[in-house]
Image: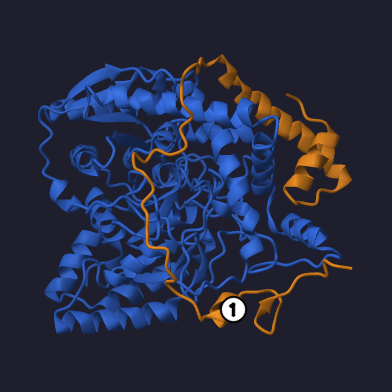
Chain colours: A orange, B blue
């Protein structure tokens, strides 16, 4: 699969990364090369093979559905670029 | 007094116990080395005051008879582990200034064992790279030099390049690393030190900045097999805060170093001789096989038929997981924020400014292979091939106890030998990635020097949760290799 500029623009938008127009050609080339490289997997017969999402031969452990901490808004907000009155702030989203 | 920075962890531990010197003296000697070797750029931040406080506290604990397994030993922490109140960046602009309000489980356990941290070590941005050149805080220089060209600066490997360089240059006695596709083992090989990626699930990932969660694993990097065994003992163990951490007590890894490997079967995979593998690497590998034979083990040729597909599999799965994990960097809760007129614009501008080229490339690849219409063709396909790779190992371990391979296809390369093709750069990890895909323990130890005076490493791969056999065999190889070379200025 080769990607063109429009495809790269669409992917960048999905990933929420702004890409300048003059970078699109170069990126399209790079990403296409990577995709060509990984497409060698099509040679491998995987009929009847289950996808492997984890190497751990275990089921996820359960824990009690209980509150284990809280009451630390100052710590939660300590690294916020912008915070106000105990909240994270964002640009206005409702007109 | 002995040169304190040349001791191994085990030696320093025993001498501290005998009272031959104090933790403060040991720490001061290393702080001096850290300062003297600052040009290597191994540290992103140094924390000498904290280190001295910790060393003083360690000496008090020793007087009180409550010293831990690593008490007073100076180490470095890869800047991927969250450290309470100490900047943690993952070598990315997007996390510059981030001060975690909590401590990662692994760095917390090391503190608990009494280890003294000298600071946070440089790495490839978000641990994505094999050269340490992708760090926002600048490349790290390998302390080793080519005999033919001692002026040329070489890479330390990556992503745990700062960890490897700092240990090799005797700035710290040991360091934490993390390994997703070879990030402990390849830099250990390039810098002539020992490092082990334990079995997936052995060390908690809680508080470690995530790259590819199904592969990421923390491990120790040090200057001997015994030192790695000591440090892994302090790092490993069940943690309810990481749902993939395995509920199994960590054994005393040091006890595994019996020196007796008689009767063990060592697998030699025939697929690990790709075209273009340097003769020097092949020779070191063959020498390694001879050492094991001489110690009473039996080499057995094995086949891992899906080896050649591991790299392609990795470069679908790792970017996919990274694109998902790195979605959290949104300019809202921590790190960099670049203003925008809308919320989406703020996200896009923040992430454009915050991520470097390699990280951006991987996020874009990952976004694509997970997107509707391509998921099955790329991501699901890669997950199936991953199972075949893991099966290759499972079958091989029905007949052998451990597997021996080279760690990397070449010795360290030049910092200025730029390579614009990401796929070529990825080939560095061709011998380490299959182990990661299968979640197995893999250790690299220095086995010799290239004709140009650079260290070459060999890798031992073990069964799941059988780090003990890996350590046992590595200990025998270490004695046979008698690797005493040191980098410039040590």
- Quarter holding the N terminus of chain B is bottom left
Percent position of residue B304, x then y:
37, 20
Helix, strand or loop at disc 1? loop
Does B304 sit above or below residue B488?
above
Q: Chain of mark 1?
A: A
Viewer-proximal residue among B382 and B217: B382
Q: Does residue B210 appear in the picture of this structure?
A: yes
Percent position of residue B61, x then y:
21, 81
B479 left or right, relative to B5: left
- Quarter holding the C terminus of chain B is bottom left
Query: At 11% from the left edge and 44% from the top edge, which residue is drawn?
Result: B258
Q: Does residue B310 appear in the picture of this structure?
A: no
Percent position of residue A59, x then y:
36, 44
Query: At 61% from the left edge and 74% from the top edge, which residue is drawn?
Result: A79
Viewer-proximal residue among A67 and A19: A67
Does B290 sit above or below residue B462?
above
**Which residue, given by chain and number where applicable, does mark 1 sit on?**
A78
B274 left or right, relative to B333: left
Does B459 sit above or below residue B258?
above
Percent position of residue B27, x then y:
33, 74
Does B450 sit above or below residue B151?
above
Q: Based on the displayed image, in which of its 4 quarters is residue B369 positioned? A: top right
Viewer-proximal residue among B21 and B365: B365
């Amino acid at each position: 699969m080769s990607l063109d500029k429009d495809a790269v623009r669409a992917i960048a938008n999905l990933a929420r990364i702004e890409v300048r127009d003059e970078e699109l050609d170069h990126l399209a080339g790079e990403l296409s090369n990577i995709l060509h490289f990984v497409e060698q997997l099509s040679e491998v017969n995987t009929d009847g093979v289950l996808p492997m999402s984890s190497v751990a031969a275990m089921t996820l452990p359960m824990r009690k559905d209980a509150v284990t901490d809280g009451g630390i808004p100052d710590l939660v907000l300590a690294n916020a670029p912008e915070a106000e009155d105990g909240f994270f702030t964002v640009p206005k989203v409702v007109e | 007094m002995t040169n304190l920075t040349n001791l191994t962890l085990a030696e320093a531990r025993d001498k501290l116990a005998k009272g031959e010197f104090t933790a403060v003296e040991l720490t001061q000697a290393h702080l001096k080395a850290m300062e003297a070797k600052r040009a290597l750029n191994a540290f992103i931040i140094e924390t000498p005051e904290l280190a001295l406080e910790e060393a003083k506290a360690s000496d008090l604990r020793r007087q009180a008879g409550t010293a831990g397994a690593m008490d007073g030993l100076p180490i470095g922490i890869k800047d991927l582990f969250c450290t309470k109140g100490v900047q943690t960046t993952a070598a990315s602009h997007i996390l510059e200034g981030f001060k975690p309000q909590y401590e990662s489980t692994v760095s917390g356990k090391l503190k608990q064992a009494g280890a003294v941290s000298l600071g946070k070590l440089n790495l490839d941005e978000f641990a994505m790279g094999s050269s340490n050149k992708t760090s926002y805080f600048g490349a790290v220089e390998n302390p080793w030099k080519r005999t033919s060209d001692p002026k040329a600066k070489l890479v330390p490997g990556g992503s745990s390049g700062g960890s490897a360089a700092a240990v090799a240059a005797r700035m710290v006695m040991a360091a934490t690393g993390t390994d997703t596709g070879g990030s402990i083992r390849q830099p250990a090989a390039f810098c002539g030190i020992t490092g082990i990626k334990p079995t997936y699930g052995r060390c908690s990932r809680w508080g470690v900045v995530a790259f590819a969660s199904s592969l990421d694993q923390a491990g120790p990097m040090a200057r001997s097999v015994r030192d790695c065994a000591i440090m892994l003992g302090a790092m490993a163990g069940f943690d309810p805060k990481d749902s993939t951490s395995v509920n199994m007590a960590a054994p005393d890894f040091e006890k595994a170093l019996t020196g007796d490997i008689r009767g063990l079967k060592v697998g030699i995979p025939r697929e690990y001789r790709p075209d273009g593998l340097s003769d020097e690497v092949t020779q070191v590998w063959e020498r390694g096989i001879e050492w094991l034979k001489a110690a009473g083990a039996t080499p057995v040729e094995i086949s891992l038929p899906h080896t050649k597909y591991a790299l392609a599999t990795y470069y679908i799965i790792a970017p996919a997981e990274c694109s998902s994990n790195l979605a959290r960097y949104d300019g809202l809760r921590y790190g960099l924020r670049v203003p925008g007129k809308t919320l989406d614009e703020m996200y896009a501008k923040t992430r454009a400014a915050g991520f470097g080229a390699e990280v951006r490339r991987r996020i874009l690849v990952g976004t694509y292979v997970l997107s509707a219409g391509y998921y099955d063709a790329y991501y699901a396909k890669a997950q199936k091939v991953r199972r075949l790779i893991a099966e290759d190992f499972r079958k091989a371990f029905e007949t052998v106890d451990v597997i021996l391979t080279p760690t990397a296809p070449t010795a360290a390369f030049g910092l200025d030998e730029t390579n614009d093709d990401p796929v070529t750069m990825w080939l560095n990890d061709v011998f380490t990635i299959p182990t990661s895909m299968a979640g197995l323990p893999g250790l690299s130890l220095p086995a010799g020097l290239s004709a140009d005076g650079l260290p070459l490493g060999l890798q031992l791969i073990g069964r799941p949760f059988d780090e003990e056999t890996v350590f046992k065999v590595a200990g025998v190889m270490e004695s046979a290799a008698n690797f005493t070379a040191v980098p410039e200025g040590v």
